[in-house]
Image (spheres, coloured by chain):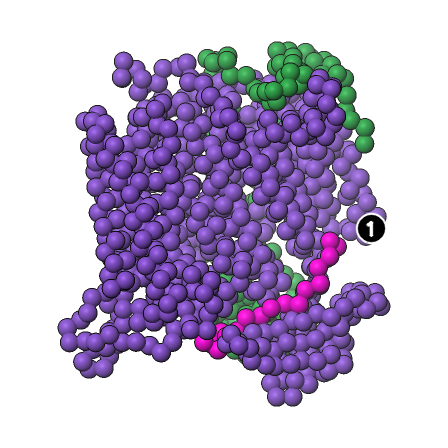
Chain colours: A purple, B green
C-alpha cells in the first residue's frame, strides 16, 4: 500500500514536471504569463510531492519492510533507526530519489524568489530545472524503482517487481542484508547529502545561464542573481569532498585521505570548474570581460555534475566507491550529450553578443592572472578527466583495461597546484587593468623574501626535499600576502574611523564579505597545502607480525603489542581489538586500540585504525591480521603521517571562509541595472 | 614583521608605472612562467623505478619489503586498490606470492613483469608508455598547450578592445575611502 502510494506519487511528479516544461516553454513562446505562472506552480509542487514519496520510502526503511527489494538490500533488523533513515542514500535507487528530492527543494525555492525584475528568465529557469528533474524521475520510475517488491512465483522462484506477477505471492525475507559497513560511518552518512546538495545547487546557476542565453539578456544580471547560489553549491561540494577525505582516512584503512579513485575524481571535477567559475565571474562583474568563458564554465560544471552522477551510479567504473551498478548508463550518456550540445549551440548563437566590454593594458594585470588561474584549473580538469576516461577508451579499443593511478595524477597535477598557489599569492598584489613586471615585482619581492624564512628554517631542521621546500615557501608566501591584505585594510579603516584594529578588521570583513571570505578560504588552502605536503612527502610506514609483548619501531616511535580481545557486540559485530602501548622517543604516551569489526549481517569487515593525533603528526596503527584462536601474534601496519591535522584544520578554515563569503546580507544591496541595452530589452522595445 | 607603508608603496608604484616599460617584457615574463608550467606537465611521463636488487640480500624478506613491491601493483580484482592495502583474501595470497618471489631472490622489476604476464597491464599503477597508452601522457600537456595559446590570444584581443564601460571601476574595498583613493590613484596613473 505505502509502496504503491510512494510510486504513484513519483509517477505523478514526473507528469507534473513534464507538464511544467511544456507550459513554461509554451508560455515563453506565446508570451503568455498565465502559462508561465502555471509552470511556476508546477515546479513549486514537485517538492511536496517528492517529499511525500521519500517519506513513504523512509517509512518502509524504518519499519523494516524487507519484502521491498531496496529495503532488504540496505537495512537489517539490527540497524539503529537513524541508520535506517540514512540508508535512503545508501543504495542506487534510493539515492536517485534523494537526488530528485534535493533538486526539487532547490528548484521550488527558486520559484519563491522575487521575479519582478527578471521575469523573462523565469520560464527558461523552469524548463532547465524541470528537464533535469524529469530526467532523474524517469530513471527512478522506469529503471531504478525503489518500491519494487519480492514475489514468489508458482515455481518457487523469487522475482522483484513493482506489480504482482500472475499467480505469485508476496515473498517476505526474514532479514535484510544491511548497509555496507563502510557506509555506516558518520562521515559517510553526511558525505553523500553534501555532495548531492553541491551537485543540485549548481543546476540553479546553470539554469539562469541558459535563461540568459535564450532570452538574449547577456549582461551580468544572471551572474549577480546566482552569485550566492554558486557559492552555496561550492560550499556543499567542498564539504562533501572534505568529509569524503576524512571518511577515507578513518575507515578505509590505507593511511591516506585521497586515492585518486575515479569516483572521487567524479566529484572533484565539477568542483574544479565551479572554482574557476567563482573566480572568473568576478572579472565579468568588475570588468565586463570573460562573458563567453563564464558560460562555458557553467555549462561544463552542469555537464560534469551529471557526468559525476553517471560515473558513480551507472557502474561504468567498478571501484571502491561504486557500490551499485545498473543499466541506466546509456540514458545518462545520451542526456549528457544532448544537454551539452544544446547548451553549446545556444552559446554559439549568442557568441557575438557576449563580447568583452573591458580592456586591460597589461598581461600582468589582475584580470590576466585570473585568466591564468582558470587555465590552471582547466589543466587539472583535463588531467582528471583524461585519467578517468582513458581506461574506458583503452577497454573499448584494445579490450584491455589499464589502471591510471595516483602516480600519474600526482606528477601531472603537482606543478599545476603549485602554480595556483603562486597565483594566489601574486594576484592580490596585481593591479586591475595595468600592472607591469616592475610594478608587480616591487610589491612581490618583499613578501617573497620574507616568506623564505620558512623553507630556510625547514632546511635547517633537516628537510632537504626540493618539492617540500618549494611547497613550504609557496604556502608561506600566500599566507603572508593574505594576512598582509587583512592588515592593510584594517589599518586603513582604523586610521580613518578611529576604531581599534580588531573592530576595524571585523567591520571591514563584515562589509566586504566576499573579498575577505575569499581570503580566509585562501588561508584554509594554505593550511591544507601544508598538511598535504606533510603526508605526501614525509609519510613513513612499517609492518610487522608481533608476538604478545614484542615491539615494532617506526622512527622515534616504539609500539608494544600488549593484548588482543575478540568479542561479539549487541549490534551484530564481531570485534577484534588490540591494545598497543606507544612510546615516543622513549617516553610512554598512551595506548592505541586498532580493531577489525566484522559485520555479521552483511558479512563485511571494517578496519578501524588506532590513531594518536597531534599537530606534528598522526601515528596511525592498523590491525592487519591475527591468529584467530590463540591471539598470540598479530600483524600491524603503522603509519606516521606528519602534519596531516593541518589538512583537516585547513578544511575547517576553508569552510568558514566560504560561509563568510556566502552569508546572506542583512539588507540585500540593490543590484544596479546595467546601462547597456540588452537585445532582450531592445526586442521588447 | 613591520607593515608595508602604504604611502611608500603608492609612490613606488607611481614611479615604476611612469617608466615606460614595453609590454613585450610582460609577455616574455608571463610566457616564461606558463611555459615552465607546461614543461613540468609534459615531464609527467612515467618514471622507470630502479630495480631493487634483492638477490644480494641473504635475509628473508620483511613485510616492508613485500609492501614496497605490493604498493606499486594494483589488485587485479578490486580495481583502483593498491595491493599493499587491499583487504581481500585474494590480495593476501598475492602478497604471499610476492614474499615467495622475493625469498627466491627475484627483484622488484622481475616480480612486476611476472604480475603483468599473469594479469595484464592493469596491475601496474600506470599504463606502460607504448601503443595507445601514449595518449595518456601526451593528451593532457597537448591540451594544456592549446589552452595556453587560447589564453594568449584572448589576452592579445583584450589589449586591443576599447573600454566601452568606464563605469566599471575596480571596487577592491568599496567601503573604505582610504584604500579606494589609493586604488583610484594607482589606476589613474
User: As drawn, which residue projects farthest toward the bottom?
Assistant: A629
- Front-lying residue, A14 or B125: A14
Residue A332, percent from left and from top:
32, 51
Residue A393, percent from left and from top:
39, 55
Residue A93, percent from left and from top:
34, 60
Q: Which residue is mark 1?
A: A461
Is any atom of residue A443 visible in this view?
Answer: no
Is any atom of residue A234 visible in this view?
Answer: yes
Task: Indicate whether residue A602 is drawn in magenta.
Answer: yes
Q: Is residue A68 left or right of residue A531?
A: left
Q: Which residues are magenta?
A: A599-616
Residue A79, percent from left and from top:
46, 70
- Front-lying residue, B6 or A467: B6
**Residue at (50% x, 76% y) in the render:** A572
Q: Is residue A104 left or right of residue B151?
A: left
Task: Indicate whether residue A467 is drawn in magenta.
Answer: no
Label 1 chain ID: A
Mark 1 nearby-residue class (10 Å; few <14, some 14–19, many ≥20): few
Q: Quadrant of residue A659?
A: top right
**Residue at (60% x, 38% y) in the render:** A657
Quadrant in which the C terminus of chain A is drawn: top left
Above or below for A531 versus A571: above
**Residue at (84% x, 48% y) in the render:** A460
Above or below for A276 versus A285: below
**Residue at (32% x, 59% y) in the render:** A56
Instruction: Please give the count of numbered marks on the rendered protein.
Output: 1
Q: Is residue B103 left or right of residue A599?
A: right
Quadrant in which the N terminus of chain A is drawn: bottom left
Q: Circle 1 sits in a helix, a strand or a loop, which is it?
A: loop
Amino acid at each position: 500500500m505505502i509502496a504503491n502510494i510512494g510510486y504513484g506519487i513519483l509517477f505523478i511528479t514526473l507528469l507534473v514536471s513534464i507538464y511544467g516544461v511544456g507550459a513554461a516553454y509554451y508560455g515563453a513562446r506565446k508570451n503568455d504569463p498565465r502559462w508561465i505562472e502555471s509552470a511556476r506552480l508546477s515546479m513549486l509542487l514537485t517538492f511536496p510531492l517528492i517529499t511525500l514519496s521519500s517519506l513513504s520510502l523512509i517509512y518502509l526503511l524504518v519499519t523494516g519492510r524487507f519484502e521491498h527489494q531496496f529495503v532488504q538490500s540496505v537495512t537489517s533488523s539490527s540497524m539503529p533507526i537513524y541508520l535506517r533513515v540514512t540508508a535512503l542514500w545508501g543504495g542506487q535507487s534510493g539515492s536517485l530519489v534523494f537526488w530528485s528530492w534535493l533538486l526539487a527543494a532547490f528548484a521550488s525555492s527558486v520559484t519563491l524568489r522575487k521575479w519582478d525584475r527578471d521575469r523573462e528568465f523565469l520560464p527558461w529557469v523552469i524548463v532547465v530545472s524541470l528537464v533535469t528533474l524529469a530526467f532523474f524521475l524517469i530513471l527512478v520510475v522506469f529503471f531504478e524503482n525503489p518500491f519494487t517488491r519480492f514475489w514468489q512465483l508458482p515455481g518457487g522462484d523469487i522475482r522483484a517487481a513493482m506489480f504482482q506477477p500472475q499467480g505469485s505471492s508476496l515473498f517476505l525475507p526474514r532479514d535484510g542484508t544491511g548497509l555496507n559497513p563502510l557506509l555506516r560511518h558518520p562521515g559517510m552518512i553526511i558525505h553523500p547529502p553534501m555532495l548531492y546538495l553541491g551537485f543540485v545547487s549548481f543546476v540553479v546557476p546553470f539554469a539562469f545561464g541558459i535563461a540568459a542565453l535564450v532570452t538574449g539578456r547577456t549582461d551580468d544580471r544572471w551572474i549577480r542573481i546566482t552569485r550566492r547560489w554558486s557559492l552555496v553549491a561550492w560550499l556543499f561540494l567542498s564539504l562533501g569532498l572534505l568529509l569524503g577525505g576524512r571518511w577515507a582516512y578513518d575507515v578505509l584503512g590505507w593511511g591516506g585521505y585521497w586515492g585518486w579513485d575515479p569516483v572521487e575524481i567524479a566529484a572533484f571535477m565539477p568542483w574544479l570548474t565551479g572554482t574557476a567559475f567563482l573566480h572568473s565571474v568576478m572579472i565579468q562583474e568588475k570588468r565586463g570581460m570573460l562573458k563567453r568563458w563564464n558560460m562555458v564554465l557553467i555549462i561544463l560544471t552542469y555537464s560534469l555534475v551529471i557526468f559525476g552522477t553517471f560515473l558513480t551510479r551507472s557502474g561504468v567504473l567498478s571501484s571502491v566507491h561504486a557500490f551499485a551498478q545498473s543499466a541506466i548508463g546509456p540514458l545518462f550518456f545520451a542526456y549528457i550529450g544532448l544537454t551539452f550540445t544544446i547548451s553549446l549551440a545556444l552559446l554559439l548563437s549568442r557568441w557575438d553578443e557576449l563580447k568583452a566590454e573591458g580592456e586591460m593594458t597589461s598581461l600582468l594585470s589582475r584580470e590576466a592572472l585570473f585568466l591564468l588561474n582558470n587555465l590552471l584549473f582547466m589543466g587539472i580538469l583535463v588531467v582528471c578527466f583524461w585519467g578517468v576516461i582513458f581506461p574506458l577508451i583503452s577497454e573499448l579499443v584494445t579490450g584491455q583495461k589499464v589502471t591510471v593511478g595516483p602516480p600519474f595524477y600526482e606528477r601531472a597535477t603537482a606543478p599545476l597546484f603549485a602554480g595556483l598557489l603562486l597565483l594566489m599569492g601574486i594576484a592580490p598584489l596585481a593591479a586591475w587593468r595595468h600592472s607591469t613586471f616592475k610594478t608587480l615585482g616591487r610589491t612581490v619581492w618583499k613578501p617573497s623574501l620574507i616568506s623564505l624564512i620558512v623553507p630556510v628554517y625547514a632546511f635547517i631542521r633537516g628537510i632537504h626535499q626540493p618539492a617540500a621546500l618549494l611547497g613550504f615557501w609557496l604556502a608561506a608566501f600566500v599566507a603572508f600576502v593574505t594576512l598582509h591584505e587583512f592588515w592593510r585594510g584594517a589599518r586603513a579603516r582604523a586610521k580613518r574611523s578611529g576604531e581599534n584594529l580588531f573592530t576595524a578588521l571585523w567591520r571591514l570583513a563584515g562589509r566586504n564579505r566576499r573579498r575577505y571570505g575569499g581570503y580566509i578560504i585562501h588561508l584554509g588552502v594554505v593550511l591544507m597545502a601544508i598538511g598535504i605536503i606533510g603526508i605526501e612527502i614525509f609519510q613513513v610506514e612499517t609492518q610487522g607480525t608481533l608476538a604478545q609483548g614484542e615491539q615494532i619501531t617506526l622512527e622515534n616511535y616504539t609500539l608494544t603489542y600488549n593484548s588482543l580481545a575478540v568479542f561479539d557486540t549487541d549490534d551484530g559485530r564481531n570485534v577484534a581489538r588490540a591494545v598497543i602501548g606507544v612510546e615516543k622517543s622513549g617516553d610512554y604516551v598512551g595506548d592505541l586500540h586498532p580493531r577489525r569489526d566484522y559485520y555479521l549481517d552483511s558479512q563485511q569487515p571494517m578496519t578501524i585504525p588506532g590513531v594518536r593525533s597531534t599537530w606534528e603528526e598522526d601515528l596511525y596503527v592498523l590491525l592487519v591480521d591475527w591468529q584467530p584462536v590463540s591471539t598470540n601474534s598479530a600483524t600491524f601496519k603503522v603509519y606516521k603521517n606528519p602534519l596531516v591535522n593541518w589538512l583537516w584544520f585547513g578544511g575547517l578554515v576553508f569552510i568558514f571562509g566560504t560561509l563568510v563569503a556566502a552569508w546572506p546580507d542583512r539588507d540585500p544591496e540593490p543590484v544596479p541595472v546595467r546601462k547597456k541595452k540588452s537585445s532582450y530589452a531592445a526586442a521588447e522595445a | 614583521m613591520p607593515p608595508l607603508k602604504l604611502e611608500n608603496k603608492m609612490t613606488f608604484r607611481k614611479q615604476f608605472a611612469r617608466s615606460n616599460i614595453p609590454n613585450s617584457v610582460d609577455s616574455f615574463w608571463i610566457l616564461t612562467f606558463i611555459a615552465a608550467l607546461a614543461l613540468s606537465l609534459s615531464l609527467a611521463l612515467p618514471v622507470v623505478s630502479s630495480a631493487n636488487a634483492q638477490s644480494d640480500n641473504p635475509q628473508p624478506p620483511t613485510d616492508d619489503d613485500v609492501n614496497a613491491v605490493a604498493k606499486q601493483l594494483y589488485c587485479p580484482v578490486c580495481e583502483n586498490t593498491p595491493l599493499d592495502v587491499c583487504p581481500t583474501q585474494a590480495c593476501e595470497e598475492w602478497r604471499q606470492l610476492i614474499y615467495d618471489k622475493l625469498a627466491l631472490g627475484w627483484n622488484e622489476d622481475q616480480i612486476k613483469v611476472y604480475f603483468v604476464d599473469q594479469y595484464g597491464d592493469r596491475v601496474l599503477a600506470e599504463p606502460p608508455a607504448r601503443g595507445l597508452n601514449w595518449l595518456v601522457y601526451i593528451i593532457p600537456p597537448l591540451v594544456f598547450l592549446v589552452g595556453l595559446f587560447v589564453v594568449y590570444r584572448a589576452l592579445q584581443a583584450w589589449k586591443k578592445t576599447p573600454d566601452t564601460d568606464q563605469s566599471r571601476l575596480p571596487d577592491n574595498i568599496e567601503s573604505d575611502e582610504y584604500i579606494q583613493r589609493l586604488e583610484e590613484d594607482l589606476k589613474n596613473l
